[in-house]
Image (spheres, grey):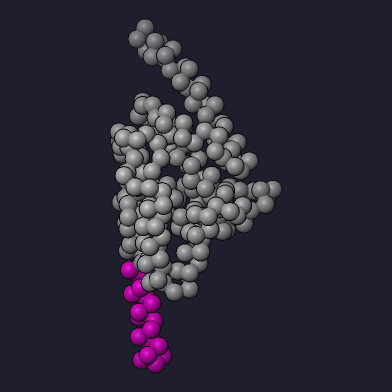
Amino acid sequence: MSASSNGGHTTAVSNALEFLKVVGKLKEVKRTGWVRSGVQGAESVADHMFRMAMISFLVGPKEGLDKDKCIKMALVHDIGEAVIGDLVIVGEKDKQDKITKEEKQKLERKAVQEMCAKIPGVGEEILALWEEFEAGETPEARHVQDCDKFEMVLQASEYEENQGMQLPDFYRTTAGIFKTPFVSAMDAEVRKRRSERIKDEPEAKKSKTE
């Protein structure tokens, strides 16, 4: 190996490590909506993206989707938050950040572009997947957008059960928005179980005091 090619390899490795260092911050960035809602031990952005990828892994052939692309898209759709943080633009006004959807997208795009510039080739693939998700025009992007919202609904349900709290805003802001059959069916089941749980809670509390 020549000195010049060895130098190129060293630079590529260095850039890859720098990219991974930035991406690793997603394990520390807590999901803002949960923190502002009083959830204890709120999940990180990385936690959220991982389960989104697993939801996409469950997609069957009849859905007619490129499963590999969906998994990749789920894993990269929020990487810009490693730089800008998890900014909230929906839900209760007092829990939102003072920023518009357009402003947030501009900041996030700049962050993703800068991150991807460090890793030529694969960086272009990551940026293209991010842009596809943001546009929401392909079947895969619509599926992953559904996964994004559904994973939040599922997490809200788990926090309610585990921490004895109510998080209605997360259900209200996602009611009726799902576009894909698989995710819509899971969302309907989670909401059904939640309704049954809430209905049974008074009796459960009553039995504990008797």
Position of 168 with respect to 179 (left or right) is left
Residue, x 49% and y 26% (percent of image)? 194
Judge whether residue 11 is colored magenta.
Answer: yes
Residue 145 lies, with reference to residue 117, above or below; the image says: above
Judge whether residue 197 is colored magenta.
Answer: no
Q: Quadrant of residue 6?
A: bottom left
* Res. 208 visible in picture: yes
Position of 66 with respect to 72 (left or right) is right
Residue, x 34% and y 47% (percent of image)? 99
Q: List x then y, in percent, for residue 187.
A: 54, 35
* Res. 44 visible in picture: no
Counting the numbered discs, the total is 0
Residue 8 lies, with reference to residue 95, above or below; the image says: below
* Quadrant in which the C terminus appears: top left
- Front-most of 85 and 98? 98
The dominant secondary structure in magenta is helix
Q: List x then y, in percent, for residue 168.
A: 42, 28
Q: Quadrant of residue 107?
A: bottom left
* Quadrant in which the N terminus appears: bottom left
Residue 103 lies, with reference to residue 116, above or below; the image says: above
Q: List x then y, in percent, for residue 37.
A: 32, 34
* Residue positioned most to the bottom: 2
* Residue positioned most to the top: 210
Q: List x then y, in percent, for residue 188.
A: 57, 32
* Residue positioned most to the right: 62
Q: Which residues are magenta?
A: 1-18
Residue, x 43% and y 34% (percent of image)? 170
